[in-house]
Image (spheres, grey):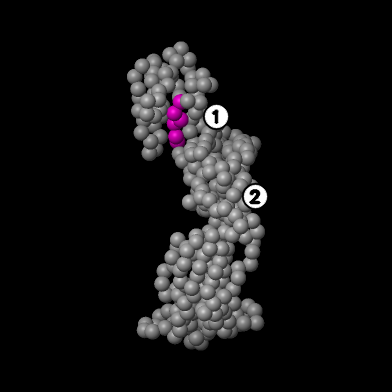
Amino acid sequence: MKHKLTAALLISVLALAVVVSLGGCGAEGNGAYRDPSVPIVVEKGQEFVIALESNPSTGYRWLLGEELEKEIVALEKVEFEEPQAEKRGHPGEERWTFKAIGTGRTEITLRYARSWVEASQGKLEEKESAGSEVKEESEGEKLLGEGETVTASKEASAPTALEQDNLERIVEKTAVFRVWVKKKGIVDKEPKKYEDPEEAIEVEEGYRFSVVLESDPTAGFQWRLAEPLDEDVIALVSATFEAKGGEASEGAEEVAPGEEVWTFEALKPGETEISLVYGRPWEKGAPEETRTFDVVVKAVEGEESSGH
């Protein structure tokens, strides 16, 4: 029975080691970002790559869908990598290299589109794309915007270079990447630790900090959030348990008392609280103990912070 209880407690302790990624290590193979759902977190002055599947032989390629916020990021270069020899006929990959110019948050919108459309029988014909509305104008005219039209050549099978620049592009798909450029030296900085609730936590946006609490999982106790976090101001990065004297030796029947380390990231300037309660998760009623930490997130000092 004792061993079963110990095993249950160990599972409970291991459940504390929950890590919530905020994108700082979201780059995949070759150090490139491919998944728009993963935020890109970099430091000022750092270069980063967005890599997307592409097949230019079809007339499609990736294009900037929105103008960049140049005070935050700048485009350095765009390269196309062909598929490996054994994968001939498959799409290759476009690699967009950007540089973080200034601190702040922004978005990079890329659209996979054709930059030309075929002209046939005096009309512009285009392939319908998901989520986009196709409009055909008579006599070779394509409506581009308010009061803006381009007339297709009846003789040419494709528009001239000038017309190609002006023609509305046919969008096949869109990828929007969220980018957070932090102050230089911030990403790898060790989080400052706080143990006393009487000490106000003051931290600049972008930095991480930890709340350290004594814990004894051998008795089934653990810390948990009493109230949801204000996710506009801070976010939970990880919650881990550290036994006193180091990790428990392999094959040990019990986990020694130790500390829970809750690490958070400061997202945006503001004031909030972190309220944690200590008790057995399966027991109802008042918790054994409650700790509340006041948190003040400040804007980055010494630099202008831009973006959303």
Tell me which label, 1 or 2, sits earlier in the chain.
2
| Cα distance in 3D space between marks 1 and 2 | 35 Å
Name the residue tied to disc 2. Answer: 45
Looking at the image, is mark 1 or mark 2 nearer the viewer?
2
Vertical placement of 132 versus 4: above or below? above
Vertical placement of 166 versus 266: above or below? above
Residue 200, visible in the rendered structure: yes
In the image, which residues are magenta? Answer: 167-172
Q: Secondary structure at mark 2?
A: loop
Residue 228 at what x, y percent from top left? 41, 69
The reply to whether the magenta stretch includes residue 168 is yes
Query: Residue 199 is drawn in which quadrant?
Result: bottom right
Question: In the image, which disc is placed on residue 87?
Answer: none
Do the numbered discs 1 and 2 sit on residues whose CB atoms are within 8 Å?
Answer: no
Query: Residue, x 48% and y 15% (percent of image)?
Result: 156
Residue density around tag 2, few if under 14, some if 14–19, many if 20 or more, within 10 Å: some
Name the residue type under label 2: Gly
Question: In the image, which disc is placed on residue 57?
Answer: 1
Residue 83 at what x, y percent from top left? 61, 37
Residue 18, visible in the rendered structure: no
